[in-house]
Structures are given as C-alpha cells and as structure tokens.
C-alpha cells in the first residue's frame, strides 16, 4: 500500500488533472484533484527537454485496484485524502466522482455544504447527479461533521443572540462570518448575498449564498 510519495514533479497535465512524481528514479502517475493540482509546482525543464531538479513535494495517495487496472490518486493534504475515502464509501460514488467533487470543494467546504444539505451544489460535479448528491448528504453528514466539526453550520453560527430590532443585521453578520471562515473574500460574499432573501434563517441565507458563490 502506497500511502505517500515524496519526490519531484516531472510531468503535469491540466487536461487530465494528472501529475508524475519521480521518486528514486521511478515515476508514478497520479490522478489529482483540481485543488491539489493548483498547489503543486510546475515542472522545470532544461534546454534539452529533460526535467531539471525542482522543489520536492509530498503527496498522499490512494491506490485503486481493479481487474483490468491499477490507479493512483493523489492529494496535497491528509484531510483531502480522508474526505476522498469518505466519499467512495457512499453507495454509487466511485473514485472519479469523488475526485470531481473534491475538485469543486475543499474538504472543509464540502463538510459545510453537506451540513447545509446543499445537494444542488454537490450535483454540479461532473458525473454526480441529484440522487447521488442526496446520498452523499444522507450518508456523510454525521461523518463529515466528526471529521470537520468547526464547519458544522450550527457550530459556525455559534450562540450569537440578537434583539428583534437587529435580527436581520445579525443574521447577515453571522452568514458573512460563516462564509469568511470558508475562505471567501468580502467582495465575493457581498456579491453572493446581494440577491439573497434575508427573511430566512441564517442556515438558509448561508445555503443560498453558497449556491451563488459556486456559480461564480
């Protein structure tokens, strides 16, 4: 079982979302998520076309063994690997669908989206339909909350109390704080909340804002 690879990136292909990591003279081709690909260094080549020594990387891996193929999947963080393993435990979610989901969401954003039961956003991943997205939410909500408790909507909302006069303002602030925790900028949050119905609950405001952010 190959758990991690530590070496130099010698090839990188955006179209297939794959990289080759050379370790001790052996090159391992990995299928990676878009998020992982964005964090890995671009290969450096010499004038003669050979790969120059570059920055060493460490990638977590998962090996998928089938009758007709053996494939390695790579992840920049252990959290992403753990999220991948949870996703492929869901009925109907294979490695390709799991990689597609994790290319749209970081593990933390996935946990938050699942907590919000936002199946529509999850179904935007290629190869993931509405029924599959619903199963992801149903089967992983508790598991993801245990893995990433800080991204449970109820925890993110906290115990903030507001008066009736400032209820709407308080809900907006809570929603903004929750989205900021997920890494969105103030301008992105402001644009996403522009057309959101503020009469709903904080959870509903966050869910609608997330849906808008996913379209940007």
Image (spheres, grey):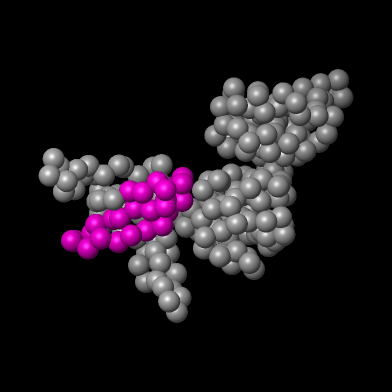
Q: Quadrant of residue 54?
A: top left
Quick check: 47 left or right of 60?
Answer: left
- Figure check: 99 above or below 35: below
Count how many numbered circles sit on residues in the image: 0
Q: As rendered, which of 74 and 161 lies closer to the eye?
A: 74
The residue under the point 39% across, 64% down is 72
Q: Quadrant of the C terminus?
A: top right
Quick check: 74 left or right of 6?
Answer: right
The residue under the point 59% across, 67% down is 89
- Figure check: 95 above or below 57: below
The boundaries of the magenta stretch are: 12-36
Q: Quadrant of the N terminus?
A: bottom left
Instruction: Inspect the magenta stretch and tell me whether residue 18 lies in it.
Output: yes
Q: Quadrant of residue 142?
A: bottom right
Q: What type of secondary structure mainly makes up the magenta span?
A: strand
Q: Position of residue 62 (x, y in %)?
A: 43, 64
From this viewpoint, is residue 80 visible?
yes
Instruction: Inspect the magenta stretch and tell me whether residue 186 lies in it.
Output: no
The residue under the point 72% across, 23% down is 194
In the image, farthest residue toward the left: 48
């Amino acid at each position: 079982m190959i758990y991690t690879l530590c070496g130099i990136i010698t090839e990188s292909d955006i179209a297939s979302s794959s990289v080759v990591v050379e370790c001790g003279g052996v090159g391992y081709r990995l299928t990676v998520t878009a998020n992982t690909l964005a964090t890995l260094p671009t290969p450096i080549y010499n004038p003669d076309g050979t790969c120059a020594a570059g920055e060493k990387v460490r990638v977590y891996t998962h090996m998928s063994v089938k009758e007709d193929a053996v494939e390695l999947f790579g992840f920049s963080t252990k959290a992403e690997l753990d999220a991948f393993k949870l996703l492929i435990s869901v009925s109907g979610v294979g490695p390709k669908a799991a990689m597609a989901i994790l290319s749209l969401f970081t593990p933390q954003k996935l946990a938050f989206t699942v907590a919000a039961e936002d199946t529509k956003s999850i179904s935007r991943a290629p190869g993931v339909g509405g029924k599959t997205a619903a199963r992801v939410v149903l089967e992983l909500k508790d598991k993801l909350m245990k893995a990433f408790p800080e991204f449970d909507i109820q925890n993110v909302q906290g115990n903030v109390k507001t008066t009736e006069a400032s209820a709407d303002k308080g809900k907006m602030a809570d929603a903004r704080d929750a989205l900021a925790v997920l890494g969105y900028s103030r301008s992105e949050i402001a644009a996403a909340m522009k057309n959101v119905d503020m009469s709903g609950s904080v959870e509903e405001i966050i869910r609608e804002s997330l849906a808008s952010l996913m379209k940007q």
